[in-house]
Image (tube, rainbow, N blue to C red):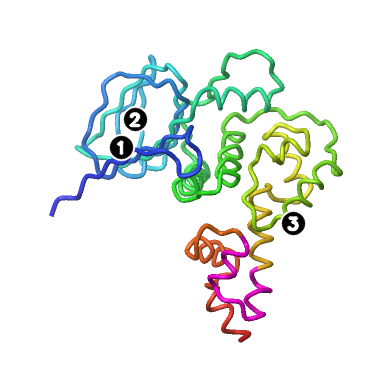
Amino acid sequence: MPKEIVHSLSKSAALDFVEMRSANHSNSCYSTHSHDEFSFGVVDYGSAKYKNLQHNYQIQAGVTVTINPGDAHSCNPDQGEWSYRMLFIDSDWMGDLQRQMFARKHSDYLPFKQSLLSDRHSYQQFDKLYVCLRSESNPLMAEGCLIDYCQQLFTPVLDSTPLDATTVSQVQELIMDQLDSNIPLTDFCEIANLSPFHLIRSFKHQYGQSPHAYQLDQRIKRARLLLKAGDSLADTATALGFADQSHFQRNFKKRTALTPRQYQQFFI
């Protein structure tokens, strides 16, 4: 039986400036074209002939490709089919992030340093980001994941300015005071008077996790107490601001290797 060919194009569940595309065992060819967005993605299966500007490449499963806005490129699968996933990021958003990362005042974009990344770590990091953007409905988590990933792609030389632990602690206190609320990243930035990039960097330096990861970690800690006390799974998920029980269960199991129900059965 021939493999089913699946194409998907959609926006991120939480970020409307991110478009996501995937193809599963596709035989589609792409003539020379360009995008207004920054785009990057991975080959999951097969191989293809890929041309970006005047450079020709042979790409295969495990390779990460980066494409700058306006770069003319084409790609055609070898032996009939290939599978891939791509992300398209609004150029204005990326330009603003770059200005934060590099403390730049002018508005032109910095290009990707490399057209191809062949190491397994790069592939795994993209996979983690793609899964997050596809399934995560919390903008704080989704944008935090994207900023983390882009920081690695552009590998900025970070300054050594001391980080203000007192300012960042105000963000931590807000998270703990409103653990059931999905607080926008912009609110954290306003409190700390930092850009999104520098807020995430400073928070990770102080607490070992980005704000969204810290929030999830604290929610799961609180969930353990509620479950031990006999609260229902539905009430616990609602009390801690999870979108639904499935979202709660998925994140709980990631951190405990048990479903909430399995965990509760040890104590009730």
Amino acid beneath label 3:
Met
Residue matched to label 2: 58
Amino acid beneath label 1:
Ser
The quarter of the picture where residue 201 lies is: top right
Amino acid beneath label 2:
Gln
Q: Residue at x 61, y 77 (%)?
A: 231
Dividing the image into 4 quarters, which one contains the C terminus? bottom right
- Whole-number angstrom distance, CA of label 1 to CA of label 2: 7 Å
Query: Which residues make up the magenta segment?
Result: 223-240
Whichever of labels 3 and 2 marks the residue nearer the N terminus, that label is: 2
Secondary structure mostly seen in magenta is: helix
Q: Given contact means CB atoms under 8 Å apart, are the residues at marks 3 and 2 in contact? A: no
Q: Given contact means CB atoms under 8 Å apart, are the residues at marks 1 and 2 in contact? A: yes
Looking at the image, is mark 3 or mark 2 nearer the viewer? Answer: 3
Whichever of labels 1 and 2 marks the residue nearer the N terminus, that label is: 1
Residue 47's mark? 1
Q: Residue at x 51, y 23 (%)?
A: 91
Q: Position of residue 92 (x, y in %)?
A: 54, 22
- Whole-number angstrom distance, CA of label 3 to CA of label 1: 48 Å
Residue 176's mark? 3
Whichever of labels 3 and 1 marks the residue nearer the N terminus, that label is: 1
The quarter of the picture where residue 83 lies is: top left
